[in-house]
Image (cartoon, rainbow, N blue to C red):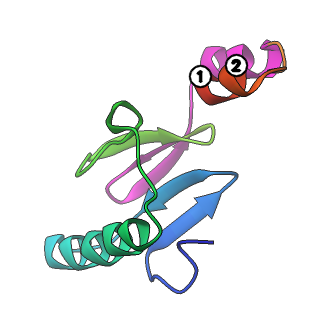
Amino acid sequence: MLVIGIDHVVDCIGNLLVHTSTWQDQVRTLREFFGSLQQVNFILRPTKCMIWASTIDFLAHRLKVGAIGRQEKKNVEKVRIARRPKTKLEFRTF
């Protein structure tokens, strides 16, 4: 995988999370991460990316500086009852 060996990058079922404790570490890690993507001509979809967010929802959890909490149950329920994608297009947009 593209992120193996890059510190502070987590890949969980195709969801990538870059986490650091300082702005300088974040810049260094993102440079390394984007460089590894560029080497294999991997393209990220900007509409699916968040950079320098102080709070994000990631895999049914709300992550923010210094805290991890559960995401709202209604959002988790939407994913739980969603129809399973059957085509590549449906999978990409899920």
Label for residue 93? 1
- Looking at the picture, how far across and down is residue 11, in whole percent? 60, 62
User: Which secondary structure, mark 2?
Assistant: helix
- Looking at the picture, how far across and down is residue 63, in whole percent? 44, 48
Per the rendered image, the range of residues in magenta is 62-82
- Looking at the picture, how far across and down is residue 79, in whole percent? 72, 21
Task: Check if mark 1's residue and mark 2's residue have beta carbons within 8 Å.
Answer: yes
Given residues 70 and 39, the one toward you in this image is 39
Judge from the rendering whether residue 5 lies leftward or rightward of residue 23; answer left or right: right
The amino acid type, in three-letter code, at marker 2 is Glu
Decide whether residue 73 is among the magenta residues.
yes
The amino acid type, in three-letter code, at marker 1 is Thr
Above or below: residue 22 compared with residue 15: below
Residue at (64, 14) in percent of width and height: 74
Q: Quadrant of the C terminus?
A: top right
- Looking at the picture, how far across and down is residue 56, in whole percent? 40, 41
Quarter of the image holding residue 37?
A: bottom left
Decide whether residue 43 is among the magenta residues.
no
User: Which secondary structure, mark 1?
Assistant: helix
Above or below: residue 47 compared with residue 80: below
Number of disc labels: 2
Given residues 69 and 76, the one toward you in this image is 76
Few, some or many C-alpha atoms within 10 Å of disc 2 (few <14, some 14-19, many ≥20)?
few
Q: CA distance from mark 1 to mark 2?
A: 5 Å
Label for residue 53? none
In the picture of the structure, the residue carrying the numbered disc 2 is 90
Q: Quadrant of the N terminus?
A: bottom right
Judge from the rendering whether residue 80 lies leftward or rightward of residue 49; answer left or right: right
